[in-house]
Amino acid sequence: MCARATRLSDKEIKSIKPDDKDKVLSDGDGLQLRVRCNGSKLWNFNYRHPTTKARINIGLGTYPEISLAQARQLTLENRALVAQGIDPKEHRSQKRLEEQSITEHTLFNVASQWIETKKHSVTADYATDIWRSFERHVFPKLKDMPI
């Protein structure tokens, strides 16, 4: 049988003082707390990549903002992804790109970029008229619509 890691407690984490070298404390199931020299405490999830089998760390956040219970919950979610053959790091970055594309490519942002390029080829009054029409007729209902 393999050795089981001793679970960390909240009291133990609060009492940890920084050293002159970084130290890593394990909670089990791949959850680690990295205590940096400057005193910051960072949660990491250590796992094997589903296809390459390489060891990878993914950051879960800093200690006071992410509690021990939240870090354990995030670890369980990431372990479930690994069990399904999904790399948690790639999954997280893909989710962030999707969220960014929804917020970045709205009708308002695209129209703003378009009017910036268009206003150099038309008169200033015409560009103002187009923008006013957008503001009056299009933006009130469709401003945040993703494109």
Image (cartoon, rainbow, N blue to C red):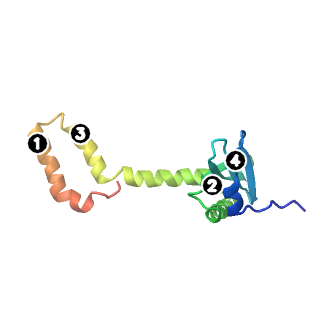
Q: Residue under circle 4?
A: 56
Query: In the rendering, at what x and y percent does residue 121 appear?
Result: 17, 34
Q: Are marks 2 and 4 in contact (CB under 8 Å)?
A: no
Q: Earlier in the sequence, mark 4 or mark 3?
A: 4
Q: Residue under circle 2?
A: 88
Q: CA distance from mark 4 to mark 1?
A: 56 Å
The label number, if any, that marks residue 126 in the structure image:
1
Q: Is residue 50 visible?
A: no
Q: Residue under circle 3?
A: 116
In the figure, residue 79 lies in which quadrant?
bottom right
Amino acid type at image mark 4: Ile
Q: For the view shown, which residue lies furthest in the right direction?
A: 1
Amino acid type at image mark 2: Pro
In the figure, residue 113 lies in which quadrant?
top left
Q: CA distance from mark 2 to mark 1?
A: 50 Å
Taking the image as shown, residue 8 lies to the left or right of residue 97, namely: right
Element marked by disc 1: helix
Q: CA distance from mark 1 to mark 3?
A: 13 Å
Q: Are marks 4 and 1 in contact (CB under 8 Å)?
A: no
